[in-house]
Image (tube, rainbow, N blue to C red):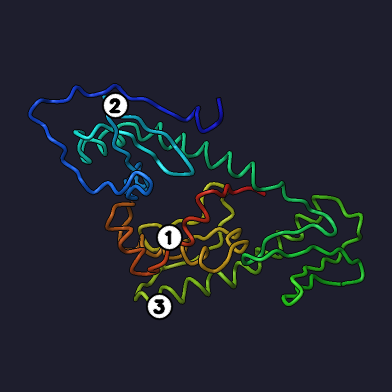
Amino acid sequence: MGFLDQLSFLLPGFESPTARSPSVHDNGSAANPKLRKILLAGQPYDWVLTRSSRKTVGMTILNGLIKVTAPKWVSIEEIETILAGKSRWLINRHQEWLTAQRNRLEPAQQWAHGASLQFLGRTTRIELDPLAGEIIWDASAQLLRLPLPPAADHEQVRDRVHGWMQQQAKEILVERLDLLAQQAGLQYSHFQISHAKGRWGSCTQDGRIRLNWRLVQFSLPVIDYVVAHELAHLRAMDHSPGFWSEVAKILPNFEQGRSVLKGVRLED
């Protein structure tokens, strides 16, 4: 049985009430079902519905979507109630899918002469040059030259790169934060670079915003999404529909950046 097959889950079915008729008719076509959203543990997830003659409601994770198969007489509201009741199971299966995608698509980061890394969404090559004297960033050539011998070990190269990226993050992240805050008419009380391995950013009730330095690996749309996310918490401290509305006001195309981070794990 394949990985996706193992994610399949079957719920106990409902016996069709004799007086009930189909309550939903906007399901899209079988080949192109309508994309819907549902909040699970405060986070939005995409799901699609396929109607069938079966007597049970089934669900699976397929290509990052929650795919639901249900009888025609089960309403959207009932299906969403079922999904909410299985939120923990769905979130865990979705995370398993993300992990499988990451392991399949992302090679382990190498820290050596000639290795590549991501900076501002572009591939950058590491060059070790003991004569460099200092770290040199050549944006046109996408080259990061480190003052280290070619035989420098993994930890030396990693620590130099991380130190440089953290310095860049202090400038880049506060610049994006100030820009979006000004455009949205928002004011935060304090900014700090974060080294946390569990989250990309945070915002406290008194307006203190922290952004993870590792965000500078990504392009500006991704950085701006996290910035907008934390700024929106100045108006809504939850992840309700109202919160996501605030995010959209700050950054209308926030889904572009958000979709990138869905499959990424914070790590060295």
Q: Above or below — where is 90 with respect to 223? A: above
Residue drawn at x 31%, y 36% is 83
Q: Above or below — where is 50 with respect to 150? A: above
Image quarter for residue 49?
top left
Q: Nearer the viewer, residue 239 or 89?
A: 89
Identified by mark 2, the residue type is: Arg
Chain-order first, disc 1 or disc 3: 3
Q: Which mark is residue 7?
A: none
Q: Which of 216 and 38 is in front in this view?
A: 38
**Residue 11, image x, y percentages:** 32, 25
Residue drawn at x 41%, y 67% is 253
Where is mark 2, residue-wise?
54
**Residue 65, image x, y percentages:** 42, 44
Badge 3 vs badge 2, beta-carbon distance below 8 Å: no
Identified by mark 1, the residue type is: Glu
Q: Which mark is residue 182?
A: 3
Q: In this view, does 83 lie to the left or right of 175?
A: left
Identified by mark 3, the residue type is: Gln
Where is mark 1, residue-wise?
255
Q: Is residue 261 left or right of residue 252?
A: right
At label 2, counting other C-alpha atoms closer than 10 Å, the crowd grade (few under 14, some 14-19, many 20 or more) is few
Chain-order first, disc 3 or disc 2: 2
Instruction: Report how far apart the C-alphas of labels 3 and 2 lie in the structure.
Output: 54 Å
Q: Is residue 125 left or right of residue 65?
A: right
Q: Nearer the viewer, residue 159 or 255?
A: 255
**Residue 254, image x, y percentages:** 42, 63
